[in-house]
Amino acid sequence: MRSLYKIFSLCLLFTVTSLNYGESAEKEIVFPSKTWETRTPEEVDLDSELLDQFAKKVGGDGVIIRDGYLVISWGNPQRRRDWASSTKPVVATLLMFAVQEKKLESPDDLIRPWVQRRWPDKDLIEKDRTMTFRHLADMTSGYNRGESPGSHWAYNDYGIMLYIHMMVEVFQSPLDNVVMSRLAPLEFEDGGIFGSRGGNGVDASPRDFARIGWFWLNHGNWSGEQLLPRDIFDQCCQADVPADLPRTQSEGTDYLRIGTLGGGPDQSGDGPGVYGYNWWFNSEVGPNKERFMPHLPPDAFQANGHWGKECMLMIPSENIVIAARGRWGGTKLEHAKLIMQANLRGK
């Protein structure tokens, strides 16, 4: 009886059900080993001509994964290049590992003790002393702005640089070492994950970055092993910035002199209602309650660099992950309409 229970439990680990939205349909969960197993688009209910149109529109380098299989690649999918702000959710993933490993009690831990450890001769100014790791991950830190933490939205690369410094201090190790050790079961094919922007940016290949996307889509699970506790992952992988949070209005200074990864301290009004822990979610926003990406299912979420150039899109209800550097059609990934048109399931 006990052995039957074990067999049943293992079977559950390798079954996926459409999550939260859409029709439930059991599908085997497949994970790559040293290479991605391939299928034709039609074998996983996708229209190959429309996928080719999508790849042509986006250009650059990319891969599409469905049900854990590589169904199409284009450009140079093994080439390592910078992923710009799509790096940020990888940093958020390391924040989750820090909580799992009890290096932090929660994302709501104050960062001030870590600032003092990293720079013994510096400190946060009085306004910023309530700043937490969550504020950094949600772009509500107030660093280099005039408002207090949590009170205003600012898409702020100075805050992200502070965030990266804090994670390096928490782990006492460069970010690439941290991610390669925690995500070793993913068996990356093409080398490290962090390497651009002085070691602070993700420069993975599309086919390796898609492994991280598949890990995200499966709620921190990889091949039956829960690398991150699902409750921690689910608490963090959600829209977390209140829809009514006002955009920053007041300038500040980079008083810690940490610099930036390339952007400024106030780059976009988009974010409240759809942003959380560095991902962008397909929530309803605005007076008309339109979804942020109206052409995609409600559960879609993305990592986005350069406003639609270096992106990873996860669609859990369709078991699809796409990692591509090119031109996706802006922050809302307009070209992804073709992915839904190519979907043959339920038609």
Image (cartoon, rainbow, N blue to C red):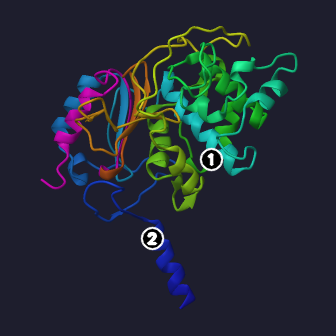
> Is residue 268 at all visible to an observer of this figure?
yes
> In the image, which residues are magenta?
318-347
Instruction: Check the image and report above or below for 169 versus 298.
Output: above
Mark 2 — residue? Answer: 12
Q: From the top left corner, tell me how far across and down residue 14 is, in percent.
A: 44, 65
Instruction: Report whether 238 appears left or right of 144.
Output: left
Q: Residue at x 61, y 46 (%)?
A: 183
The amino acid sitting under disc 2 is Leu
Instruction: Check the image and report above or below for 108 versus 197.
Output: below
Structural distance between the alpha carbons of marks 2 and 1: 23 Å
Instruction: Report whether 254 appears left or right of 82.
Output: right
Q: From the top left corner, tell me how far across and down residue 44 is, in percent.
A: 25, 53
Q: Nearer the viewer, residue 279 or 155?
A: 155
Question: Which image quarter: residue 6?
Answer: bottom right
The amino acid sitting under disc 1 is Ala
> Is residue 35 at all visible to an observer of this figure?
no
Mark 1 — residue? Answer: 184
Q: Secondary structure at mark 1?
A: helix
Instruction: Report whether 29 appears left or right of 248.
Output: left
Q: Residue at x 34, y 42 (%)?
A: 300
Question: Which image quarter: residue 326?
Answer: top left
Q: Examine the structure image and report whether residue 296 is included in the region drawn in magenta.
A: no
Which residue is the extreme one toward the left? 347
Q: Nearer the viewer, residue 43 or 168?
A: 168
Q: Residue at x 30, y 22 (%)?
A: 59
Q: Examine the structure image and report whether residue 326 is included in the region drawn in magenta.
A: yes
Q: Residue at x 17, y 50 (%)?
A: 344
Q: From the top left corner, tell me how far across and down residue 242 is, in percent.
A: 45, 34
Q: Secondary structure at mark 2?
A: helix
